[in-house]
Amino acid sequence: MSHVVTRFAPSPTGHLHIGGARTAIFCWLLARHYGGRFHLRIEDTDLLRSKQEYTDSILASMRWLGLDWDGDLTYQTQRADVYSRYVDKLLETGHAYWCDCTPEEVEAMREEARQKGLKPRYNGRCRTRELGPGVGRCVRLKTPLTGKVVFDDMVKGRISVDVSELDDMVLRRADGMPTYNMAVVVDDYEMGITHVIRGDDHVSNTPRQILIYEALGLPVPRFGHVPMILGPDKQKLSKRHGARAVIEYQQDGLLPQALVNYLVRLGWSHGNQELFTRDELIEYFDGNNLNPASAAFDPAKLEWCNAHYMREMLLSDLARLVAPFVQQVGLGDLGQERLEALCLMFRERANNLKALAESFRPLVLPAAELVHAEKDAKKHFTDQGKEHLRKLSAVFAACESFDADTVDSALNAYVADNGLKFKEVAPPLRTALMGFMGGSHLKDIMAFLGREETLERLKRVTG
Ligand code: GLU
């Protein structure tokens, strides 16, 4: 394909959620794969629910995810005149007509159809009345009376809808505002969109939009309707199961590359590959292999994916990214060097940046504030355990320097020289240093703490 133009068209009535984010990722990838363009259009015609703060938030999430867009943003509210021109064109060519039926009358027609067991619909009363403009009049499309609308969906395959299912839809409301379908067609045409990828909640709009393209004599783009993301229980995705805003995942300390990687796999595949670099995604995402079945959201897999990227990234980058979370959990500004040392010790043990920051706490607190887990203290601070700690204090005090290798040798020598087993000595030492039976390698913990702080922690136990 030589020329691919896609767009993401969010309504700014809330933050960007993961379903929308996945759609945006698909659109972005398709454009980047073919070296085309990706546009962003803000569908803000719902004046009551649209808010600038949501537009700002959606843009921030797009940037955070690394989904850059081409050209300027388009706001639908700024384009009412453009839509109107196209409606006028349809009136001139006889593809549309004025209608003065009141909402009550239209509702009565719909009710009548319902009574007859038919789909509720407008009955075409004004179609042949040749009305002109007037107060309270809307404009409707003169839908062909027979035939089918057929299109090959990129995800769902061939879709065919009989026009008898579609009534003469309103194109421009009595207040002069275009309807959603009208505006979308005009925008997609004017923006040169070749591929419309969106959620399948819009699939019933597509035949209507195709009728508008045809009435205007415009080329019809390709459509792809991606199925909803379901919860782990295969029900509608609930808040509890991850139906959350991208910004919430960001605040929880997820990495954008993990979220992108995870979401792209929810509905698209490339063999069995699970982890992709961004370049690989761009290389492989050609619009094929989009799964028509709904995928279930799996929080554990997302965490796994995130853990992978946390382990893989440059230590210096991880330290920079975790810094705000360290501040947020109340551990202050530790400086890049100490953060890197902590990340090295704990990054294998945390699945997100927030948990990583939290795992630093025992090592960052002053000795006096360290809390000993009751169970571990009881088990390991026995008379014998304390005796080891007392002797180790002397050993560590005598170390020439306090780097990881030196303290490690000193500890090993203590164990060997006294005919002990490591597991007799390590648990009380670990509990004294960390407050619980967890953490990283003892030598790294001690090197990080330094001699003074290490001895201080031992003293708190030995008294
Ligand atoms: N504004 C619509 C939405 O947020 C998207 C419509 C489209 O992609 O055509 O659901």
Image (cartoon, rainbow, N blue to C red):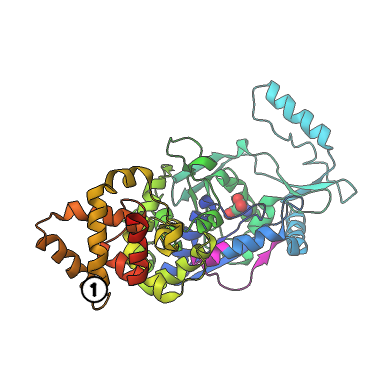
Q: Secondary structure at mark 1?
A: helix
Residue occupying the far bottom of the picture:
400
Q: Is residue 81 above or below residue 384?
A: below
Q: Is residue 250 above or below residue 101?
A: below
Q: Is residue 398 visible?
A: yes
Identity of the amino acid at label 1? Ala
Q: Residue at x 81, y 47 (%)?
A: 138
Count residues near mark 1 (Cα–Cα under 10 Å), then give few for <14, some for 14-19, many for 20+: few
- Tell me: 101 left or right of 114: right
* Quadrant in which the N terminus is drawn: bottom left
Mark 1 CB within 8 Å of ligand 1: no
Q: Is residue 272 visible?
A: no
Residue occupying the far front of the picture:
463
Foreground: 391 or 229?
Answer: 391
Foreground: 442 or 420?
Answer: 420
| Count of numbered tags | 1
- Tell me: 19 left or right of 55: left
Residue 167 image offset from top left, x and y in percent = 68, 39
- Tell me: 296 left or right of 8: left
Q: Residue at x 82, y 32 (%)?
A: 105
Residue 149 image offset from top left, x and y in percent = 55, 45
Foreground: 289 or 157?
Answer: 289
Residue 135 image offset from top left, x and y in percent = 90, 48
**Which quadrant of the view contains residue 29?**
bottom left
- Asked whether 456 falls inside the magenta stretch, the response is no
- Asked whether 64 falls inside the magenta stretch, the response is yes
- Tell me: 370 left or right of 415: right
Q: Residue at x 34, y 60 (%)?
A: 459
Q: Which residue is mark 1?
A: 398
Magenta region, residue range:
61-76
Residue 345 image offset from top left, x and y in percent = 32, 64
* Quadrant in which the C terminus is drawn: bottom left
